[in-house]
Image (spheres, rainbow, N blue to C red):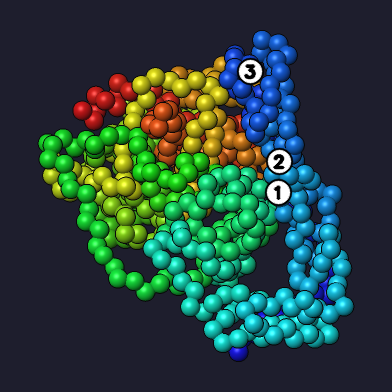
Amino acid sequence: MFFSDIDYDVDSPTDTPYYDFDVNDWLFDLLDESSVCDPNPCFNGGSCQSKSRTEFTCSCPEPYTGKRCQKVKDICDRVRCGNGECMVNLKKPPYYECKCRPPYRGPDCKTLPASACEPNPCQNGASCIKGKRRFHCACSNGYTGKFCEINELDCFMGNGESYRGAASVTEKGEECLDWHSYFIVRNGEDPFTTYSDFSGLEQNNHCRNPDGDEKPWCFIKKRGALNWGFCKIKKCTEVTTTTPLPATPTTGSSQFSQCGKLRPFRNSRIFGGTKSAPGSHPWQVSVQVRPKRSSSAFGHVCGGILLNSCWVLTAAHCIDNTNEFQVVLGGVNIEKREEMDQTIPVIETIVHENYRETQAALYNDVALLKLKVTNSPYCARETPFVKSVCLPERPFPSGKECVISGWGATETQRYSSQLLNARVFLISKERCQTPQVYGNLLDNSMLCAGTLQGGIDSCQVCIYLKKNLRGDSGGPLVCEENGTHYITGVVSWGVGCGEKKKPGVYANVHTFLNWIKSNIN
């Protein structure tokens, strides 16, 4: 019989961290607003009112705020849920509700029933046993969990996208957050709008796999920050079948079938700043090094971008010719071997002839890596997890929303084993060259992009996507248009972490098109 003790005598205040809600409005001040209200610059159903040819205001519907209605108001700031947690419900006023920890009740989770076991909070026929300061559930055979909610036969099929069980603990024993927890929404996520399969009825903390990851997972709170973890659920016993690799095209070219196309996802919205599903950034490369003539293991040092089967674009400042290079493609975790990984040696490095490094900036910061042919005429094989990105046909306009991805590494430090991503907005050269931003440090080889995430959130994620959420050195800044993804920038340099008016600086790929094509062709 399984026992679980639950304390209920501590009246702790609702955990509501402080946030600076205007910390990221500086970004919008840098964006060009030549069209003002066309297209509508306001998010979440906000309406745009023109103040002049270059200024506008957004009228935000409840419960949104911010210069462009891009943020949820601090709905839970003045809410005290006592022995419970404030949950967000964006569909109806007052846009929150208190979820009480058993046995507490009432709208503010401060009321105790006459008996902690009436009504019985334990599930699946379990007995509730009341003590002086706590109660516990005595689970029937075959059930476990704090409230005996988990069947011991519980398991998931495939990658768990269809899993609808009650497991709510990670592999490391951390308790899952409710999917509509205020803490999740305030840290930039909203599962109910991000993932089409979630309905308003999914008001629990059960493990799910809405983004097609390798198994069910959930959000957790770790050291005061939003994080996630795979769940403690076993995989169902099933007959395994081997899926054959796609047939290699018979063409004599090392080009993939098409560039810039993702495999189909249930929802194309990115998972901002937290984790990336396999195949969501299939052109992302881990550039790895070890000293020449060494037998030591390779280590991740920079990001890179797959241009075609045999060429990778990266940052020039990542290249040190005293090292031996290899690239790893396909996987999202750089600390373990994944079945979708492809590891390929680099046989040549080409640094831009005008690359220049100063104490303040990096100029013409691009380099190419030529890969070894592994299956003639191919180096990397095209799979759902390995695809090439397209070179840009033209520059994208300022204000365009794009995506950065990476493991948050510089040449000397590594911060995340899991591939991460974040949304950023392109900023015009004119705005980025103003004295309060980067002044005359910028030239035509560079472009700027800034992220919506700022303040506490930004610096927590910045530990991973280092230096103002710029991703790895050498990693991709990718913009999408009509379902095709184009490499727009290469992560280069920046100042600080989440500092106002200090966006990330990228090598401007469009200015290097002739150089890239002349080398890879």
Q: Look at the picture and state if 291 lies above or below 397.
A: below
- Residue 176 found in image quarter: bottom right
The total of numbered circles placed on residues is: 3
Residue that mark 3 sits on: 37
Q: Are marks 1 and 2 in contact (CB under 8 Å)?
A: no
Q: Secondary structure under badge 2?
A: strand
Residue placed farthest to the bottom in the image?
1
Which dot marks residue 13? Answer: none
**Of marks 1 and 3, the one in the foreground:** 1
The amino acid marked with disc number 1 is Asn
Q: Secondary structure under badge 1?
A: loop
**Picture quarter with the N terminus:** bottom right
Residue that mark 2 sits on: 72
Left or right for 254, reference 77: left
Q: Earlier in the sequence, mark 1 or mark 3?
A: 3
Q: Earlier in the sequence, mark 1 or mark 2?
A: 2
Which is nearer the eye, 2 or 437? 2
Image point 33% across, 48% down: which residue?
A: 385
Residue 408 location in percent, x, y?
Answer: 49, 47
Measure the C-alpha gap from mark 3 to mark 2: 22 Å
Q: Residues within 10 Å of mark 1 (few under 14, many from 20)?
A: some
Which is nearer the eye, 416 or 255? 255
The amino acid marked with disc number 3 is Cys
Measure the C-alpha gap from mark 1 to mark 2: 11 Å
Q: Residues within 10 Å of mark 3 (few under 14, many from 20)?
A: many
- Residue 98 found in image quarter: bottom right
